[in-house]
Image (cartoon, grey):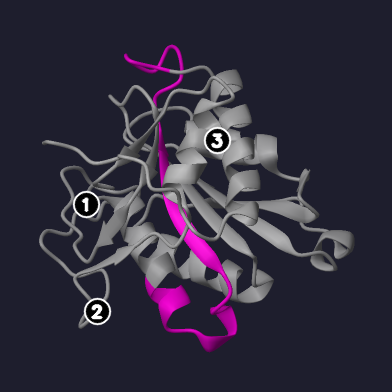
Amino acid sequence: MVASISPAHRAKPTILVTGFDAFDGANTNPSWLVAQKLAGSHIAGHAVVAVCLPVVFGRAAEELTRQVRQLRPSVVLCLGLAGGRCAVSFERVAINVDDARIADNAGARPIDTAVVQGGPAAYFSSLPIKAMCSAAQNTGTAAEISQTAGTFVCNHVFYALMHTLANTPDLRHTRGGFVHLPWLPGQGHPHMPLESMVPGLRAALECALATHKDIAHAGGALH
C-alpha cells in the first residue's frame, strides 16, 4: 500500500517513510499509522511519501527496494513496532541475520539465516541519529538511541535498505535508517499516543535533511 504519490510529488525531492501492516494477532501497527500521518506533507521542500510493507521476510525487502529505486528519495526512514519499549528508538545498526521468534504473516520463521548471502555482517544507519533523537526530544517526544533492531522483519528491512543504498550508484546520495516505535495505548505497556510520536518524527526528518554530520552526544548502552 502506498499513500500520497502524485505527479506533483514526483516532481519534488522526496522523503520515503515506510511502516508495516499489523502482525502477531494485532489489529493495527503504529508504524503505518504514523507513516500515514506524515504522508502528503512537505518537510524542507521535500514531499513525504508513505509505503506500507508486509510483515513478510523477503517480500518486505523487495517492496522497499522497488520503491527506493523508483523514487530515489533524499531520505528513507523505515518505521516498525517494538512492543515493550517506552520511547521512539533510533536504530544504530542492522545485522545480517534473520532469526524469528515468531512466524511472519506468511507463516515463515527463518532461523540463523542471512538477510543477504555473502553480505557484510552489519551496516550502520547513514542518518544523523543522535541529532535526530535530540530533535525529537525537543518536541517533548520520548526518544532514545537503540543498539539493536532485533532479528525479525524490522531488522531484515533495515539491513536490506542499507545494502541497497551501499550497492546502487544511483542512490549514493540517499541516506537511510530505521526507527522503532512503542505500542499504542490499548496495545500493551509501556505505550505512547500517536499524537506524541508524530511531532517528534517530523522534527527528526527536518533534522535529517539539515544535518550531515551527527552530533557528538553520548548515546551508548551498558547492556
Evaluate if marks 3 and 2 touch, with contact meaning CB atoms under 8 Å apart. no
Give residue 35's position: percent from left, percent from top: 60, 41
Residue drawn at point x = 22 percent, y = 80 percent: 117
Q: Amino acid at mark 2?
A: Gly
Evaluate if marks 3 and 1 touch, with contact meaning CB atoms under 8 Å apart. no
Tell me: residue 13, above or below residue 101.
below
| Tag 2 secondary structure | loop
Query: What residue is shown with label 2?
Result: 119
Can you tell which quarter of the image residue 36 is in? top right
The crowd level at tag 2 (other Cα within 10 Å; few <14, some 14-19, many 20+) is some
Q: State which region is magenta.
A: 163-191
Q: Amino acid at mark 1?
A: Thr
- Residues 15 and 139: in front is 139
Residue drawn at point x = 82 percent, y = 64 percent: 12
| Tag 3 secondary structure | helix
Question: Which quadrant does the C terminus fall into?
Answer: top left
Give residue 173's position: percent from left, percent from top: 58, 75
